[in-house]
C-alpha cells in the first residue's frame, strides 16, 4: 500500500474520532487487547531496566500516537516510524500481541490492527534483542 493511501486511511480514522468527539471507536476489536494511552511513567524516555518485546512495541506505538520522539528513540531505532504517517488523533488500533515468526533467530513481530472505513490496516513491528539486554523496535511494516 502506498504511503498516500495509508495516510488517507489513518487520517480518515483520526477525523472520525475528532468529529465523533472520541465517543465512538473507529477500530473494531475481536479478541485482542485494545490500545490504551500510557502515562509518562509507563514509557519513560530513559528506561530503568531492560524492556520486553511487547513493552518496546507498546511504547513505540504510544509515542507515535502522542508524537513523542524521545520515547520513540528510547524503545526503537532512529527512523523506525518513517513508514507511518503523522497521527492527528489516536487511531485506536488494537494490539494483537507479539510472536516469533518461524525461522526467526531473535526477531519478534508485534502487530497492531484496526478496521477502518477504507478497510483493515495492520502495523507489524519487528522487535529484536534479548531478555537480559532488552528489546527495541527495529522495523515497521504496514499492511492494508
Image: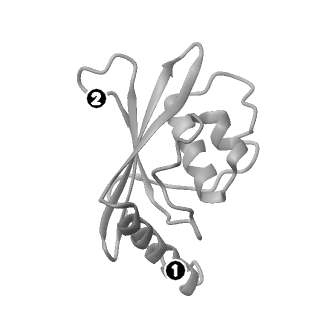
* Residue closest to the eye, 136 or 131: 136
Tell me the residue at 60%/15% (across/down). 133
Q: What x and y, as percent, mark residue 31?
A: 34, 54
Q: Is residue 94 left or right of residue 86?
A: left
Q: Secondary structure at mark 2?
A: loop
Q: Looking at the figure, which quarter contains the C terminus?
A: bottom left
User: In which quadrant of the rendered view does residue 36 lie?
Assistant: bottom right
Label disc, if present, on residue 101 of the rendered structure: 2
Label disc, if present, on residue 122 of the rendered structure: none
Q: Looking at the figure, which quarter contains the N terminus?
A: bottom left
Which residue extends farthest top? Answer: 132
> Of label 1 and label 2, which has the lower sequence position?
1
Q: What x and y, as percent, mark residue 54?
A: 50, 35
Tell me the residue at 54%/85% (across/down). 20
The scheme the figure's colours follow is one colour
Q: Which residue is mark 1?
A: 15
Q: Secondary structure at mark 1?
A: helix
* Residue closest to the eye, 82 or 45: 82
User: In which quadrant of the rendered view does residue 22 lie?
Assistant: bottom right
Q: What x and y, as percent, mark residue 57?
A: 52, 40
Q: Is residue 78 left or right of residue 108?
A: right
Which residue extends farthest left? Answer: 102
Amino acid at each position: 500500500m502506498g504511503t498516500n493511501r495509508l495516510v488517507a486511511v489513518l487520517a480518515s480514522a483520526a477525523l472520525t474520532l475528532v468529529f465523533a468527539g472520541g465517543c465512538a471507536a473507529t477500530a473494531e476489536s475481536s479478541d485482542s487487547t485494545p490500545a490504551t494511552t500510557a502515562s509518562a511513567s509507563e514509557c519513560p524516555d530513559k528506561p530503568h531496566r531492560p524492556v520486553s518485546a511487547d513493552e518496546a512495541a507498546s511504547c513505540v506505538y504510544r509515542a507515535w500516537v502522542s508524537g513523542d520522539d524521545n520515547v520513540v528513540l528510547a524503545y526503537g531505532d532512529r527512523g523506525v516510524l518513517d513508514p507511518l504517517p503523522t497521527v492527528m488523533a489516536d487511531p485506536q488500533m488494537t494490539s494483537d500481541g507479539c510472536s516469533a515468526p518461524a525461522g526467526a533467530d531473535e526477531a519478534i513481530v508485534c502487530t497492531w490492527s484496526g478496521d477502518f472505513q477504507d478497510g483493515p490496516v495492520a502495523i507489524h513491528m519487528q522487535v529484536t534483542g534479548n531478555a537480559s539486554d532488552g528489546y527495541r523496535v527495529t522495523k515497521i511494516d504496514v499492511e492494508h
